[in-house]
Amino acid sequence: MSNFNRRDFIKISGASAAGVALTPKLSGVFQNFFQKEGKHLLESDAVKVPTVCEVCFWNCAGWVYKDQEDNIKKIIGNDDDPHSNGRLCPRGTGGLGMYYDDDRLKKPLIRVEKEGQQSFKEVSWEEAFDVIEKNMKAIDKKYGKESMALLFHGKTGPHFEHLFKAWGSDTMGEPAGAQCLITREAGFIATYGAGLASPEPTDVRNADCLVLIGNHIGENMHNGHVQEVSTLIDRGGEIITVDPRFSTVASHSTTWLPIKPSTDLALLLSWMNVLINENLYDKDYVEQYTYGFDLLAEHVQKYTPEWAEGVTTIPAADIYKTARIMGAAAPKTIVHPGRHTAWYGDDTQRTRAIAILNALLGSWGRKGGFYFPEKLKLPKEAHPPFPKPKWSWKDISKKKHKLAIMGITNEILDNALPEYKGPHKVKGLFIAATNPLQSIPDEAKIKRALDNQEFIVVVDTMPSEITGYADVVLPEATYLERLDHLRTAHHRQPNVALRYPAVMPKYDSKPGWWIARKIGLRLGLDDFYEWEDFEEVLDWQLKQVGSSMEEMKKEGVKLFPRNTPMYLEDGEEYWFNTNTGKIELFSTDLDEWGYDPMPVYKSHGDVPAGFLRLIYGRLPMHTFGRTLNNPNLNDLKKEPNLWVNPKVANIYGLENNQEVWLQNPKGKVSSFPIHVRITERIRHDSVFLPHGFGNKGRIMVNGKVEEMSRTYGRGISDAEMISNIEIDPETGGTGMRNNFVTILTEKPTKTEEKS
Ligand SMILES: Nc1nc2c(c(=O)[nH]1)N[C@H]1C(S)=C(S)[C@@H](COP(=O)(O)OP(=O)(O)OC[C@H]3O[C@@H](n4cnc5c(=O)[nH]c(N)nc54)[C@H](O)[C@@H]3O)O[C@H]1N2
Ligand SMILES: Nc1nc2c(c(=O)[nH]1)N[C@H]1C(S)=C(S)[C@@H](COP(=O)(O)OP(=O)(O)OC[C@H]3O[C@@H](n4cnc5c(=O)[nH]c(N)nc54)[C@H](O)[C@@H]3O)O[C@H]1N2
Ligand code: SF4
Ligand SMILES: [Mo]
């Protein structure tokens, strides 16, 4: 697999050479874009305003350049920013399309009914707040405040979390938990007593060997990580990629292991077997820092590479070889923890196996492994204590799943279903910056939960699918037009970054903080909003750490010194936040709570006859569905393709670029077709479908249809096809990868799902 030119790996656009992008083709597109948008702008005439990108949750810091007439011209990275190192990814540079998109929500909307027909009417903010105040108070009176739940994501979220906590509801969750990384956090917490958060503290820039298991950095454009992986490629480092799909990073790896989907835990356990039996593990480290090694050594004896070959289809010889490469490079070997880890319902156990492997390799707390990140502690604004709700998300999920460390969106929605008869009913939803129809499985159930609500508010920037279910739609200003909480995410050095409005909000949109505060005042929460402008809160916070708004508007990013070493010193005594104070190879907590204390391989079954496994994932130039209508990014990729192996194409008689539909085992047919791409890069038992497409959001506003016109009806939504969910017992995470589809060359007339 090494005949590829490894230097051609993903390029991230540099601050000075504005607009070098992904592939030669892409970079051309971006260069044109910059020539078109930027050629009249001399930097000396320009005004620059600091921002934090919201196009994905890597949250890179950058500069927005505008001309004297307040036209945004370009966005570039901030050189001092550790998330971006002064370079933005193509989505970040294209972020100004979010601001310019003429399909944006323009005014507050309320649902009205006329002659049996429902549609939206444009109203003033005060009219919209009247409806919200009346309905939130009615839900409180009938069921209690706790029955109004908040679903949120991104930097908009915390404004509404504050509102809900002040009001008295802690019934809240975000898809970045149960649908994304909660299982990985749980796996690492059970092992090291610490999670990873974002950005993951992987020291790739100093590593010699990187193992990627279903984490396709490359298409997954996590900026700083892509840059570090790129340097590892240039340095000739070892990259072992385990993926049923020949992903971009697989094509630049020293080894690609095309694993049979769903069998990763078998491979991980057999790697442990080789590391232990061949004495390739870090003995001093294991002896000093870990608990339960002898139990683990005995436990993995049955998981030989020969056994794993039968399960994973990876030859035993390759398993031995890769384990030896990992052992030789240790402790500068990183078995990457992954990010979107909601796969097969045993995801805490799989990510725990990854955590354990890193402990055997001695890479946690070591240079070239995982560094100890530091975060700037910012004091919180003063306010009275939040009232204590009678029940919260914990009552819904914590009793069922001991490692549910945050609200479980899908279980909050279970309690919103008509058949839920328990004491923790959800009767109203406040949905801010998330699109549950694409991000939370399964679609049929979500729709029933939405239908059963007495009141729904949606805060969005676009007429996305979820807006069609709302009683009130509130248009939020885009990240380029608003102020949000300071970014203080941990990194190699503590740091703070400011997002400041570069321009006034377009249309009648408003920033999230303004919306939340106005609703708070309507609900009588004046004591929690003793400021008029959120900028006052940020200025106060910054002054507590020796900075100010004035300074941050000029600098954008400020770095602070570390307080502790970044790595363990040789033989240093170290206390881990677990019951034993050690890295737990045998987890005492999991054992006590009745879960497997060490990961055990369990089969997830085979692909049913007549079906193919549905593999979904990211495209480099889009973030979920949120960028598809962005005019700049839509230009780069309007439609996804369904990846199909030539053998499969042969069986179904498919030609390249042919239009097909998908059908799942429950009989549900995709709403829209997709074009086929025949390629050896996908296994013959699977198809690959990029996530986020198949948009079917269309609303009537004042008698006119509004939609995301550049993306409506293009491609198939993976979420629409997912009907089988395997719940991770430790966390409640939703495994979405045991799903299957068959290919239809013509659309059948009847498309209803049997339920
Ligand atoms: N089937 C399937 N489901 C998945 C995944 C998958 O790959 N496949 N991935 C999972 C993962 S890893 C994650 S993190 C989640 C992501 O889940 P979501 O965050 O729900 O993802 P998006 O689909 O981007 O939905 C974002 C919504 O916010 C709106 N929006 C964008 N920017 C703003 C803003 O600045 N303000 C406001 N108010 N609204 C804004 C968009 O218009 C859109 O309606 O999905 C998870 N669910
Ligand atoms: N461009 C872009 N970048 C993004 C995002 C985006 O929307 N767009 N979203 C961001 C977010 S919130 C997240 S969480 C991350 C997610 O990024 P990742 O954690 O990389 O997750 P996925 O994109 O879901 O891709 C997972 C990979 O797993 C492979 N795979 C599928 N089944 C199996 C299996 O059984 N075993 C193995 N070993 N591999 C399997 C797929 O082929 C795919 O290559 O990306 C982030 N970065
Ligand atoms: S990785 Fe790209 S899209 Fe994500 S925050 Fe950074 S620049 Fe924005
Ligand atoms: Mo995610």
Image (cartoon, rainbow, N blue to C red):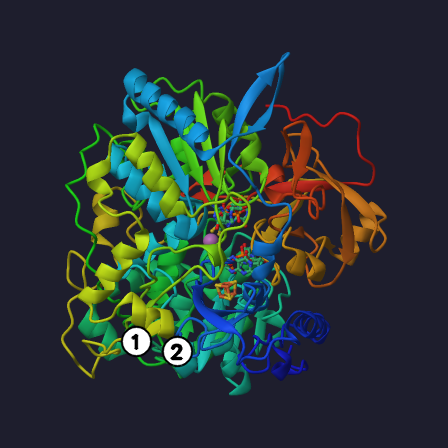
Q: Estimate the x, y position of residue 719 in percent, counting from the top left.
A: 58, 41
Q: Residue furthest bottom?
A: 235
Between residues 434 and 496, which one lies in front from this camera angle? 496
Residue 732 visible (yes or no): no
Give the CA distance from mark 2 to mark 1.
8 Å
Measured along the vertical axis of the image, is residue 402 above or below residue 497? Answer: above
Res. 82 image quadrant: bottom left
Question: Which quarter of the image is occupied by the N terminus?
Answer: bottom right
Q: At x 56% / y 55%, what residue is drawn? A: 99
Callout 1: CB less than 8 Å from ligand 3: no
What residue sits right under mark 1 in the picture? 559
Q: Is residue 220 left or right of residue 183?
A: right
Q: At x 54% / y 77%, what residue is drawn? A: 45
Q: At x 29% / y 46%, what residue is drawn? A: 403
Secondary structure of the residue carrying tag 2 is: loop
Q: Residue furthest top?
A: 115
Secondary structure of the residue carrying tag 1 is: strand
Mark 2 nearby-residue class (10 Å; few <14, some 14–19, many ≥20): some
What residue sits right under mark 2 in the picture? 80
Res. 206 image quadrant: bottom left
Q: At x 62% / y 65%, what residue is drawn? A: 247
Residue type indicated by callout 2: Asp
Q: Is residue 136 left or right of residue 52?
A: left
Q: Estimate the x, y position of residue 723 in percent, counting from the top left.
A: 57, 35
Q: Estimate the x, y position of residue 752 in percent, counting from the top left.
A: 68, 25
Residue 118 visible (yes or no): yes
Please say if the residues under marks 2 and 1 sit with CB atoms less than 8 Å apart: yes
